[in-house]
Each structure stands twice: as C-alpha cells, then as structure tokens.
Amino acid sequence: MIWFTGDQHFGHANIIEFCHRPFKNTDRMRHALVSRYRKVVSEDDTVYFLGDLTLAGISHHSFVETLLYELPGRKIMILGNHDKLAPFTYENMGFESIHTALEIPEGYILRHDPVASITRPDKIWLCGHVHTHYKTLKNIINVGVDVWDFYPISIVEIQRLEREMKKEE
C-alpha cells in the first residue's frame, strides 16, 4: 500500500496550540502520531512524508533517528520549510530518498508547499504546509495529519478524492 502524510511537527510544542491539536504536550502528541501511523502502515508499505516531520536540528539527531526507527515502511521524504537537517542526514537515518518535489508514477505531484500547483493545473498536487485550512482545494489534496485525524492517508483515499474533485469541475 502507498501512504501519504505530512506536518507531524514532532517535538514542536507551539504546533499544539497553533493547530488546536488535542494533546497536552509533545510527548503525548508523538505517542499518538506514532501509534496511529503504526495502526495502518506495515513494513511492506511505502510512505511519502510531505515535509515538516520535525523542527529538530542536528543537535537532536538521535531524536529523529529513534523516531524514524519506530515508523515502519519504506520512507520517502519531500522536504518542508521546517526540515532542518541536511538531505543526506535524513537518508542516513532511514529515508530512502529526499526531494523538494516529486512526480510519482501514479500521476500525482508531491510538494510540501502547494503554491506551485498553479503551474500545472492539469495535475493533482499532494501537499502539506496548510495544516487545517482545507482538505482539498481545486487541484490540491492536503495530506497533513491535522485534517486526517493524525493518520497517514492511503492512495485509495487519494484516488477517491481525485474522482470527487473531477466530478465537481
């Protein structure tokens, strides 16, 4: 199965208040996000992370490495504006590849910030960055955890949303 997720902001206390997340602290948020991820993602799955995994910099290398170890599946990273580590550092921690944007064989363009979606209105863009602002908008699907009850979203759900979006055109 293919999954998409983004905007976890592990270790970021301010995101709890900013997005009205139902967690008392970052430890509870981490536990809930990891638990929900593990409920749906298996070791054989592929997961695209669309940015802002954590704000942790190089001084928190072990935090990020431990976190990635807890998350099963083949992991591919699309960098977000808060991802502070060097791309090869993320690769060495467990991501298979690192990108700023990526068009996948299923026909979707993956990018953290959806602003570039206006350049290719013929494509469906999967993004994060917008947190609670919308699930879908024109040719954009927000895969951030804030609008999916803190779970990753499956390719099956993405395809269903795409069909709905095309009906509305």
Image (cartoon, rainbow, N blue to C red):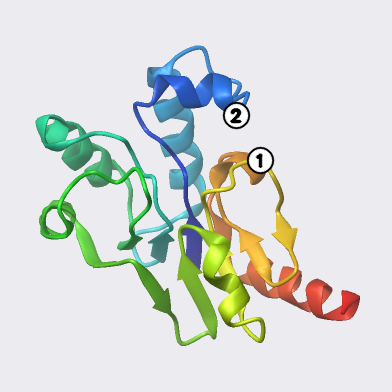
Q: Is residue 1 visible?
A: no
**Label ID, residue 132:** 1
Task: Identify which residue is drawn at 53% across, 52% down.
Answer: 152
Can you give x and y, in whole percent of width and height, for residue 155 in the image?
58, 70
Q: Looking at the image, is mark 2 or mark 1 earlier in the sequence?
A: 2
Residue 134 lies left or right of residue 123; in this view the side is: right
Can you give x and y, in whole percent of width and height, for residue 140 in the image?
65, 66
User: In front: 128, or 121?
Assistant: 121
**Figure check: 51 above or below 3:** above
Quadrant (top left/top right/bottom left/bottom right) for the C terminus: bottom right
Can you give x and y, in whole percent of width and height, for residue 49 in the image?
40, 57
**Figure check: 124 above or below 93:** below
Looking at the picture, which amino acid does disc 1 mark? Answer: Thr
User: In front: 100, or 105?
Assistant: 100
Task: Identify which residue is drawn at 61% across, 21% down.
Answer: 22
Q: SS of the residue at dot 1?
A: loop
Residue 100 lies left or right of residue 119; in this view the side is: left
Residues tagged 2 and 1 counted as in contact (Cβ below 8 A): yes
Q: Would you call the spot at circle 2 few (<14 residues within 10 Å), some (14-19), or many (20 or more)?
A: few
Looking at the picture, which amino acid does disc 2 mark? Answer: Cys
Task: Identify which residue is drawn at 11% across, 53% down.
Answer: 89
Separation (CA) of disc 2 from disc 1: 7 Å
Residue hosting label 2: 19
Q: Would you call the spot at circle 1 few (<14 residues within 10 Å), some (14-19), or many (20 or more)?
A: some
